[in-house]
Every structure is written in structure tokens, then in C-alpha cells.
Image: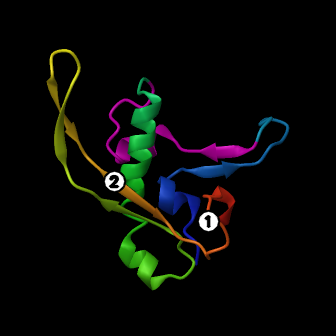
Amino acid sequence: MEKTVVEVFGTGAARLASGATTPESGLFIPDSALEDAGLATPATATAEGHLAAILVGAQSTLTQAGYDANIDQSLYLLPGFTSFVSRGVDNDSYRVDQITVSLAKLDTGSTIDPGAY
């Protein structure tokens, strides 16, 4: 069975249909779901912070064990390795944390088509 929007994006997440009060359809992820994933200030966070919160939150649902057990699950996220790099003119030390996103589909082409997952 496919994971639901709430399972992947958190409590309160929803697909919005266009209508009289909502001119466009789309995906709604409430600040509370992003806060649950560790984003302390969603209202002022960067776009990268939002994406990081989505990935961190999805790790608990889109697991490799779930992928192995459920033929309908097409994505899984795994923690990668932490490393350190020096950046900038002062060679400041940056911590680099990885999240590996794996996308699986029947072998029908060589490009990633988001609609196939």
C-alpha cells in the first residue's frame, strides 16, 4: 500500500484541490509538521531548511525495511556518513551530514520521472 501524504510529510499535511477559496492545487505541509522534524522556526527558515526538515521527517516512514516489505513503496531514505570539510577564505570547518535518497522503479528509461514513483 502506498504511503499517505500524512505518513510521509507529517500530521496535518494534505493535498489541496483547486476551488473557490484555493486557486491552485498543491501540497500543504504545516509548520507543526516541520517543527516535529526539527525545524525550530519554519516561518523564518530558509528553503533549504524546509527541505532538510522534510527529508529528516520522511526518514522515519520511508525506511529500507518498509521498502523491502512493501512492493508499493518506491523510495527509501538512509542516513549516510558524516564528514568535515573546510570552506571559505578562512577555511572554516563545516560538518557534512548525508541522507541517501533511493528511488526505485521498473527499468523503463534512464531518467528520473517523478510521476513514476
The number of discs equals 2
Query: What separation in Å lies between label 2 and label 1 (alpha carbons)?
Result: 19 Å
Q: Amino acid at mark 2?
A: Ile
Name the quadrant of the C terminus: bottom right
* x, y percent for residue 107: 61, 75
Q: Is residue 29 left or right of residue 69?
A: right
Nearer to us in this view, 91 or 13: 91
Residue topped by disc 2: 99
Any magenta on residue 104? Answer: no
| Residue for point 32% across, 34% down | 40
Residue 67 higher or lower than 20, as above or below: below
Quarter occupied by residue 90: top left
Nearer to us in this view, 83 or 13: 83
Residue 8 higher or lower than 73, as above or below: above
Residue 13 higher or lower than 105, as above or below: above
Name the image colouring. rainbow
| Residue for point 60% across, 58% down | 112
Q: Amino acid at mark 1?
A: Tyr
* x, y percent for residue 57: 39, 53
| Residue for point 77% across, 38% down | 24
Q: Residues within 10 Å of mark 2 (few under 14, many from 20)?
A: some
| Residue for point 37% across, 41% down | 35
Question: Which disc, if any, is residue 84?
Answer: none
Question: Which disc, if any, is residue 117?
Answer: 1
Give the magenta part as a residue range: 25-43
In this view, the residue farthest toward the top is: 89
Any magenta on residue 36? Answer: yes
